[in-house]
Amino acid sequence: MTNVVPTTQSCPPVAVIMGSTSDWDTMKHACDILDQFHVPYMKRVVSAHRTPEFMAVFAHTARERGLKVIIAGAGGAAHLPGMVAAQTTLPVIGVPVQSHALNGLDSLLSIVQMPGGIPVATTAIGKSGATNAGLLAVSMLSITDESLAQALEDYRETLKQKVEQSNAELV
Ligand code: RP5
């Protein structure tokens, strides 16, 4: 993962960014969903406090580079999603990464408590949150993509069938 902002207009629709490579074990679950739905994406480490200039350029130029949704994961004093949202009007989905010190409650509160005016769509802490961030991104893209809308219906159907199968096995 390099800190190079592509200058072309050929960005994929989704960016999965994270504050550190240590967030990858969580954020890979968002990428797994995007892979499953065949949604192209880019992934980068973008740190709000270690690479603030890169973060600003990344966020400022996101729309003109063709991005449509940004998924941003961070842990601890997790200011990355909010700082990115402050610098783009694209939808930003924040994923609180489970921290060691406070189990991710710090990450959650840092991301979810945005003052009114600059929204960050915040998911659950950890793997579930990253998975749902991927699904939310697919859902946003499905507004104008009928094949993605159908793929989401199919995905829900598989979830339903798993429950039905579990119940059949319990009998
Ligand atoms: C945040 O600090 C990152 O999002 C990560 O969750 C946390 C710890 O980063 P490392 O010290 O593991 O690089 O910026």
Image (tube, rainbow, N blue to C red):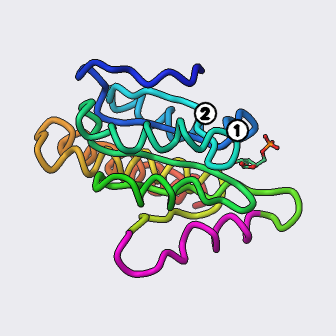
In terms of secondary structure, where does tag 1 sit? loop
| Disc 1 and disc 2 in contact, CB within 8 angstroms | yes
Q: Nearer the viewer, residue 105 or 63?
A: 63
Query: Residue placed at 29% from the left, 33% from the top?
Result: 13
From the top left corner, tell me how far across and down residue 162 is, in percent.
47, 49
Q: Nearer the viewer, residue 143 or 54?
A: 54
Q: Is ligand 1 closer than 8 angstroms to the Cβ of mark 1?
A: yes
From the top left corner, tell me how far across and down residue 121 is, in percent.
42, 64
Q: Is residue 53 above or below residue 171?
A: above
- Mark 1, residue position: 20
Q: What is the span of residues highlighted in magenta in the rendered image?
A: 104-118
Which mark is on residue 45? 2
Report the amino acid beneath label 1. Ser
Q: Is residue 127 above or below residue 116?
A: above
Q: Residue furthest bottom?
A: 116
In terms of secondary structure, where does tag 2 sit? strand
Q: Is residue 120 left or right of residue 9?
A: right
Report the amino acid beneath label 2. Val
